[in-house]
């Protein structure tokens, strides 16, 4: 009983390095992740419910939080989430919290109801203030290949057929 309750966690494998320059080992990564994921789920509530960003953040954060609550071992967490080491997940969660703060500040979903968007139909002339991209001509090879594919002609008519093991190069 003593071994399971007290000594086992103390004898658990301790990661010496992440193998990533500048990324230190976090011995209590699971607890840090759980706190960060809970904070993320709390902060994202400031974003409107019907926004795709909120739905995506809630979805993957809820999944990751569930994994962290179910697993005790960092290696198992890394394996189940499949997005790197727990230390990387911590950095990612911290970055997501910063992004949530910025998204709330920027308010990209807050388009006023009276905002009018200019719609350009295919046959309408392009306004002068809109940059126009006109691609250059394609190489002749492209048109030859396109013609061959459209006519289901794989090789030129005057070219000899090649069977496996043969080469087209003349020696």
Image (cartoon, rainbow, N blue to C red):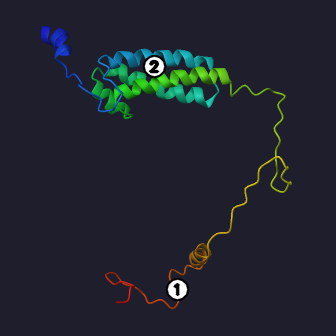
* Foreground of the two, 123 or 93: 93
Give the labeled residue for mark 2. Answer: 37
Secondary structure under the numbered disc 2 in the rendered image: helix
* Alpha carbon separation for disc pair 2 and 1: 62 Å
Q: Is residue 28 left or right of residue 16?
A: right
Number of the label disc, if any, that sits on residue 156: 1
The structure residue drawn at horizontal position 73% and vertical position 56%, both measured from the top left corner, is: 133
The structure residue drawn at horizontal position 57% and vertical position 78%, both measured from the top left corner, is: 148
Counting residues from the start of the chain, the first of labels 2 and 1 encountered is 2
Q: Position of residue 161 (x, y in %)?
A: 42, 87
Residue 63 image-quadrant placement: top left
Residue 160 visible to an observer of this rendering: yes
Q: Is residue 131 left or right of residue 53?
A: right
Q: How many marks?
A: 2
Q: Position of residue 98 (x, y in %)?
A: 54, 22
The structure residue drawn at horizontal position 29% and vertical position 24%, both measured from the top left corner, is: 74
Q: Residue furthest front?
A: 22
Q: Is residue 126 above or below residue 92?
A: below
Q: Is residue 101 left or right of residue 4?
A: right
Q: Is residue 158 above or below residue 51?
A: below
The structure residue drawn at horizontal position 49% and vertical position 15%, both measured from the top left corner, is: 39
Local packing at callout 1 (Cα closer than 10 Å; few below 14, some 14-19, many 20+) is: few
Q: Is residue 12 above or below residue 128?
A: above
Residue 138 image-quadrant placement: bottom right
Residue 124 image-quadrant placement: bottom right
Which quadrant: the C terminus? bottom left
Number of the label disc, if any, that sits on residue 135: none
Which quadrant: the N terminus? top left
Q: Is residue 161 left or right of residue 53?
A: left
């Amino acid at each position: 009983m003593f071994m399971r309750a007290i000594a086992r966690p103390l004898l658990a494998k301790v990661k010496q390095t992440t193998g990533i320059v500048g990324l230190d080992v976090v011995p209590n990564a699971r607890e840090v992740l759980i706190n960060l994921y809970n904070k993320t789920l709390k902060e994202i509530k400031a974003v409107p419910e019907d926004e795709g960003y909120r739905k995506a953040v809630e979805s993957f954060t809820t999944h990751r939080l569930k994994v962290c609550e179910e697993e005790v071992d960092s290696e198992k967490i890394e394996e189940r989430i499949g997005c790197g080491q727990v230390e990387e997940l911590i950095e990612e969660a911290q970055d997501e919290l910063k992004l949530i703060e910025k998204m709330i500040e920027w308010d990209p979903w807050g388009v006023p109801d009276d905002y009018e968007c200019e719609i350009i139909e295919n046959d309408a002339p392009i306004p002068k203030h809109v940059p126009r991209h006109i691609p250059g001509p394609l190489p002749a090879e492209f048109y030859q290949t396109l013609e061959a594919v459209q006519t289901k002609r794989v090789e030129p008519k005057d070219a000899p057929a090649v069977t496996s093991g043969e080469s087209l190069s003349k020696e």
